[in-house]
Amino acid sequence: MKRYQKSMLHGPLFPNIITYSIPIILTSILQLLFNAADLVVVGRFCGSVSVAAVGATGAITSLIVNLFIGLSVGAGVSTAHAIGGKNDEETHRTIHTALPTALVGGAVLSILGIAFSETFLRWMGTPENVLPLSAVYMRIFFGGMIFNMVYNFSAAILRAAGDTKSPLIFLTIAGVANVALNVIFVTVFDMNVAGVALATTASQAISAVLAVIALMRRTDACRLQIRKLRFYKKQFRKIVSLGLPAGIQSSMFAISNVAIQSSINSFGDVFMSGNASASNLEGFVLVSMDAFNQAALNFTGQNVGAGQYKRVRKILLTCLACTAVVGLVGGLTVFAFGRQLLAIYITDSPQAIEYGILHLSYVCAPYFVLGMTNVMGGALRGLGVSVPPMIISVLGICGVRIAWIYTIFQMPQYHTPGCLFFSYPLSWVITLAAQVVLFVVVYRKRMAMYKE
């Protein structure tokens, strides 16, 4: 085992989970900085309308992309099970099936995104003064989807093998390139949102190439050999069966966000700008918490593959505690410095900053509940259970939000931004309670099977 890979099967859990998760936190923050750099550059050099144009694409791109990115979860869990079970042939076949899946998925996404960007934006009620810029950004963004998919699948495999530092290094290199290209394309070539979209695509290409090279240079069962890429039926079915529900869940989240974004659009472009910037800020807290979701998924996956079910409960409790602390500290810190942070994105509209503060006031304090919900889902997928947590999350988060928007929010006295934002913490609490019950049921059944 390489020195930067963490043992998931042996040793104390807390320090191993922390050292495993920290590089994921840093990697995820860098990945989020891709979009943050876009918003900051266009906000400072192009104005709040351009910020709104980039922000308006977030919900719809997530809706389309997350369905395929979810398959990378299946690839990671399948790899973790094979490694935990010390099955080198299974590991080899899983990896060499995952990369073709990423390539095909990326090609499909590019075609869909380029062809229907403007149509999707019109469905969401994007204002006419924002629509042309948003459409340009989306088309260029989707043009680079193959790179996005290849990186995410490769990073999932590396993390399943215990290597979280390599993706951090790759994203650091790509992130520096992204920021530099953002400034060049916008300030030198005056390309507005097209420039930041091109910069993001180029940086994703860099990270994808580096991740593939890392897999090709491995000396264990995770080594990638390009000439052996193919679809192995058994491994493809497992990747899809574990990953597709995760993708559907993420896409359903995005559907609820599309409904919310449409409601946000109804308040005008100034409100859209403030909300987009606040959403980007809260995203830094979310990805920090999500690192422990990744830890729960992969630690659980390897221990299930090795038949070490007694260790699974300790993994879950450790990850829940870690994500709660990170969520509380991170959420309250973002809120405390909200105005200063929002001013980095928005330089021409004090009202937009106030709208951003309103968003943060409803989301930041209870944000840790969402992190705990995601950890529960990660542990369940590590156990090999993917459809039930998907159903709970879809009904609990998406169902509650959409029902809220089309009932309570439609009443004139409650048709306010605050009422809209309240649907977020309400949906998180309901979903977490249901996920806890599901885990207890599944874990007891698995322990009974293990004892038999």
Image (cartoon, rainbow, N blue to C red):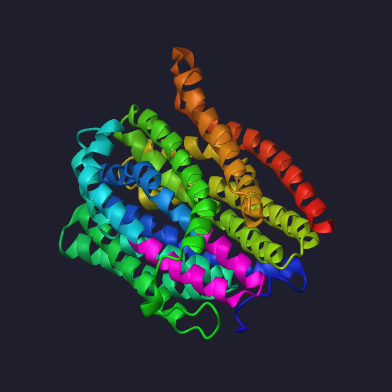
Give the residue drawn at x 58%, y 44%. Answer: 387
Q: Is residue 366 above or below residue 106?
A: above
Left/right placement of residue 16 relative to residue 343 reads right
Residue 321: tell me if it is visible: yes
Quick check: 66 above or below 296?
Answer: above
Q: Which residue: 44% across, 55% down?
A: 69
Numbered marks: total: 0
Q: Which contiguous range is marked in magenta?
A: 74-103
Front one among 436 and 174: 436
Place of residue 121 in the rendered image (x, y in percent of width and height, measured from the top left): 27, 37
Residue ID at (34%, 55%): 40
Name the image quarter holding residue 351: top left
Q: Quarter of the image holding residue 99? A: bottom left
- Position of the C terminus, as image quadrant, is bottom right
Figure quadrant of the N terminus = bottom right
Front in this rendered view, residue 61 or 54: 61
Is residue 190 located in the magenta-colored stretch of the structure? no
Q: Is residue 322 left or right of residue 404?
A: right
Residue 73 in sight in this render: no
68 vs 94: above or below: above
Q: Is residue 242 left or right of residue 320?
A: left
Q: Residue furthest top?
A: 412
Q: Say whether residue 92 is magenta.
A: yes
